[in-house]
Each structure stands twice: as structure tokens, then as C-alpha cells.
Amino acid sequence: MRVIATEHPVPLMPVPGEQETGHIKPEPAEPVTVQEHSYYLRRIASGELKRVKESAKSSTKGSAKDAAQEGEQ
């Protein structure tokens, strides 16, 4: 899933054996692809992160409908 921070940088899930993993930054930064893990799902539920739809570059079918629905939210 692709996510982006809402206000403040959010740490990436710690990886065993790595000291520093980085942060998910708010817009205008690019969304980050992460595993669908409870760590990120909790942060989405709390409002720290928001899920970003996959880009429609690979499929143009239905992209106008998706854009219209996205504008309604």
C-alpha cells in the first residue's frame, strides 16, 4: 500500500539489524510504498498517515471515474 504523512514525518517500521530506517514525509513529498502491517494500519487509523491510491498510469480504464470520486471526498 502507498501512504503519506498527514502533518509530521512518521518513522518507518523498525527493521531488525538496521539502525536507521527513515521517515514517511508529508506532502509535497512522494508517497511511500509499505507493507500492509498493523504498525501502519494503526497510524492510518490515528490520522498520522493517509492511504494514497495507486497511480492509474498502468491502467487508463476508469481513471476519470476514480478522479471524480477522489474529488468528492
Image: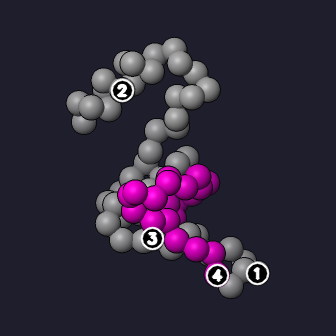
Magenta span: chief secondary structure? loop
Q: Is residue 52 above or below residue 11?
A: above
Sequence-wise, the earlier of marks 3 and 4 is 3
Does any portion of residue 56 appear in the rendered image?
yes
What stretch of residues is rendered in magenta?
A: 20-41
- Whole-percent x, y for residue 33 in the image: 59, 52
The alpha-carbon separation of the residues under discs 4 and 2 comes to 36 Å
Q: Residues within 10 Å of mark 2 (few under 14, many from 20)?
A: few
Q: Are marks 3 and 1 in contact (CB under 8 Å)?
A: no
Colour approach in the figure? one colour
Q: Nearer the viewer, residue 20 or 64?
A: 64
Residue that lies at the very extreme toward the bottom in this rendered image: 19
Q: Nearer the viewer, mark 1 or mark 4?
A: 4
| Residue 34 falls within the magenta-colored stretch | yes
Residue 48 position within the rendered picture, expressed as x and y whole percent measured from the top left: 36, 64
The label on residue 20 is 4
How far apart marks 3 and 4 lie (CA) works out to 13 Å
- Element class at badge 4: loop
Q: Residue furthest left?
A: 72
Q: Examine the image and state in which quarter residue 63 appears.
A: top left
Query: Residue flagged by tag 2: what amino acid is it?
Result: Ala
Query: Which residue is denoted by mark 3 in the rendering?
Result: 10
Residue furthest toward the right?
Answer: 17
Dot placed on the residue nearer the N-terminal end, 1 or 2: 1
